[in-house]
Image (spheres, coloured by chain):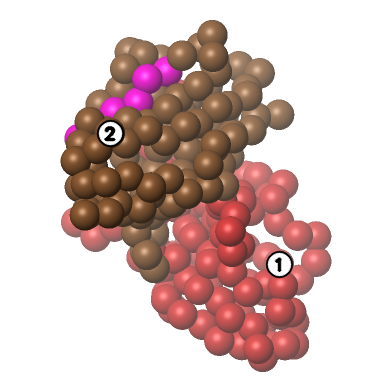
Chain colours: A brown, B red
Amino acid sequence: AQSVTQLGSHVSVSEGALVLLRCNYSSSVPPYLFWYVQYPNQGLQLLLKYTSAATLVKGINGFEAEFKKSETSFHLTKPSAHMSDAAEYFCAVSEGSTLTFGKGTMLLVSP
Amino acid sequence: NAGVMQNPRHLVRRRGQEARLRCSPMKGHSHVYWYRQLPEEGLKFMVYLQKENIIDESGMPKERFSAEFPKEGPSILRIQQVVRGDSAAYFCASSHGLAGSTDTQYFGPGTRLTVL
């Protein structure tokens, strides 16, 4: 069975600082991996997805994630945080047609 | 180009009443997925449907919950005799249903159900 672990339910950074949100997965087959962002009272918006084409995946809003098979990780990064990045971020894995989500990490950005 | 539509956005029901949540997929999408988000939790898969077919309902509670996606009209998630524990945000997603890596699920804004 597939699963996703997101380390840290809350991450705080200062505006302009590096953002690092951690995600580890378990999957019995090569996975498809996703990062979604959820702003308050809204649905989930796809940030980026890994589909085995390239290990470094670039997404929207300056985010990127690197797939590391040896570490079973898919951490999300952004070089410089912006106030508008404050939201909840979800990592998800897909082995078939459905998604399994982590519990989410709330990103807090201070001025 | 409208995205996934869900209504109502907020729904309040008293214990024992029925809740009906609607989802219209993105144009061109024939696959619909329902997820539930409880407070402090990630989204949990409930059911996967194509037009007139339930493909996977492994995440649906065995009682009181049902889902359909008729040939015409939106997908409906129905909860009978609601209880306080049903209070959650319910999200619908849709996709083309393409095989392999090209398929991506796009999410609606959700319906926030509150059971009094």
Q: Find out whether residue B2 is within the magenta segment.
A: no
Chain on which label 1 sits: B
Relative to B57, A87 lies left or right: left
Q: In the depicted view, which residue is nearer to us: B89 or B67?
A: B89
Dot 2 corresponds to which residue? A18
Relative to A37, A68 lies left or right: right
Q: In the depicted view, which residue is nearer to us: B29 or A5?
A: A5
The magenta region covers A61-67
Q: Is residue A55 above or below residue B41?
A: above
User: Are discs 1 and 2 both within one chain?
Assistant: no
Q: Residue at x 54, y 14 (%)?
A: A71
Q: Can residue A71 be seen in the rendering of this structure?
A: yes
The x and y percentages for residue B114 are 58, 81
Q: Quadrant of the N terminus of chain B?
A: bottom left
Relative to B82, B101 lies left or right: left
Q: Residues within 10 Å of mark 2 (few under 14, many from 20)?
A: few
Q: Residue at x 37, y 65 (%)?
A: A40
Question: Which numbered marker is on residue B65?
Answer: 1
Q: Can residue B31 be seen in the rendering of this structure?
A: no
Q: In the depicted view, which residue is nearer to us: A20 or B56?
A: A20
Which amino acid, mark 2? Leu
Q: In the depicted view, which residue is nearer to us: B105 or A93?
A: A93
Q: Quadrant of the C terminus of chain B?
A: bottom right
The x and y percentages for residue B53 are 60, 51
Q: Is residue A87 above or below residue A68?
A: below
Which amino acid, mark 1? Phe
Q: Residues within 10 Å of mark 1 (few under 14, many from 20)?
A: some
